[in-house]
Image: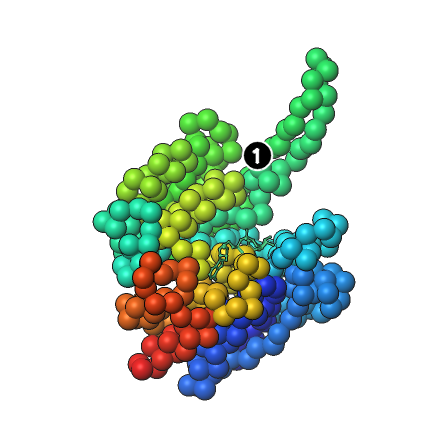
Amino acid sequence: MSKNILILPGDGIGPEIMAEAVKVLELLKAEGEALNWSFGLLGGAAVDAEGHPYPQSTQTAARAADAILMGAVGGPKYDDLPRELRPERGILGIRKDLALFANLRPALAYEALAAASSFKPEIIAGLDILILRELTGDIYFGQPRGRRTNADGEDEGFDTMHYARSEIERIGHVAFQAAQKRSKRLCSVDKENVLDTSRLWREVMIGLSSQYPDVELTHMYVDNAAMQLVKRPKQFDVMVTGNIFGDILSDEASMLGGSIGMLPSASLDVNNKGLYEPIHGSAPDIMGQNKANPLATVLSVAMMFKYSFDRPDVSGRIEAAVKAVLQAGHRTGDIAMPGEQVIGTREMGAAFLAAMTGG
Ligand code: NAD
């Protein structure tokens, strides 16, 4: 059955990087893949056209799609809008609407780019970690929360860390299954020595592990995980953790490889329907200048084939072509070392397509 993809280019460099990703879809379709796609509005572009960052037309199309490919949203033009109309509300809106609770963030260090990282090459060369962050629970959403004046008349702020067993189980299943698709090692990160929420988290992960006897489950406290990620990052394969710990660790890990223009991400629902997007923003400083690196968006297409379409062959082919392009020395400005020749968005897209077709 044909796969139906909704494409949301968004703002800033979004349309430029998406144009290159669409060429990948066109190539795959021309080769016989059953793919269809349509375009929709999200973020500032949607505010301009329809007065809302996640308009009804996009909601309808997103609910009907098998997967969604997004560029990036936001820009200075929208900074003074009221909070509910800000472009980022469009992303939060679509995540909530589609119940996308599992955030998958690979952290990769390509051999060819090892010199561009601030880490020693031997620490990060060949690094390939997948961090799974629970996205819809934890202290970011727990109740009660708020501000109040205590009995001594002092101002207080308070939040509630909260996870229900079912919320931990569903992210746990995604994590074990992701580990099965990789090297079958899963590290669950918590703060079990201090937090009751983490005690439940660990108990649930251990309980689930009997359903995945082929996956080796280990546990690590979050403070140690933050340290180990910079000390010996290659010890990790798949990591799973809650919303707040995952927020911090996935950003930390993304910097190991050195470039924001190279990293994709996915947010999945219980049926593996997903929203795929590069981790970077709309880069208004380089928009319209043919400078943006399209590879994070191209790698988001690879993740879509791996996780929503269950086609590791296609995702592997895309990932191999990205490696080949880097190995051949093609560099956009964000990944170039001083003295290296810099090419533009369209030229990088063309080099990638040539690598896909063996050129
Ligand atoms: P950013 O990621 O857009 O840019 C940070 C720096 O990285 C800039 O110098 C930019 O030129 C560079 N960069 C980013 N992507 C690149 C690429 N593909 N190729 C080459 N260089 C790239 O972050 P920011 O500047 O903090 O935010 C800009 C706007 O993006 C803001 O409006 C912010 O709210 C929004 N934003 C959106 C998302 C999203 O859509 N998911 C994420 C983060 C920020």
**Amino acid type of the residue tagged 1 in the rendering:** Met
Seen at 57% across and 59% down, the residue is: 284
Q: Who is closer to the viewer here, 248 or 326?
A: 326
The percent position of residue 23, horizontal first and vertical second, equals 48, 78
Q: Who is closer to the viewer here, 116 or 164?
A: 116
* Element carrying mark 1: loop
Seen at 52% across and 68% down, the residue is: 289
Label 1 crowd (10 A; few <14 / some 14-19 / many >=20): some
Q: Is mark 1 within 8 Å of ligand 1?
A: no
Q: How is the image coloured?
A: rainbow
Q: As displayed, is residue 238 above or below residue 284?
A: above
Question: Left or right: where does residue 309 sit relative to residue 145?
Answer: left
Question: Left or right: where does residue 236 sit relative to residue 134?
Answer: left
Residue 233: tell me if it is visible. Answer: yes
- Furthest-front residue in view? 339
Q: As displayed, is residue 59 above or below residue 256?
A: below
The percent position of residue 137, horizontal first and vertical second, equals 58, 43
Seen at 59% across and 63% down, the residue is: 12
Tell me the quarter of the picture where residue 66 sits.
Answer: bottom right
Seen at 68% across and 58% down, the residue is: 77
Give the labeled residue for mark 1.
Answer: 161
The percent position of residue 32, horizontal first and vertical second, equals 44, 86
Tell me the quarter of the picture where residue 7 sits.
Answer: bottom right
Tell me the quarter of the picture where residue 306 sits.
Answer: bottom left
Q: Who is closer to the viewer here, 358 or 285?
A: 285
The percent position of residue 183, horizontal first and vertical second, equals 30, 55
Number of callouts in the render? Answer: 1
- Furthest-top residue in view? 152
Residue 93: tell me if it is visible. Answer: no
* Quarter of the rendering occupied by the C terminus: bottom left
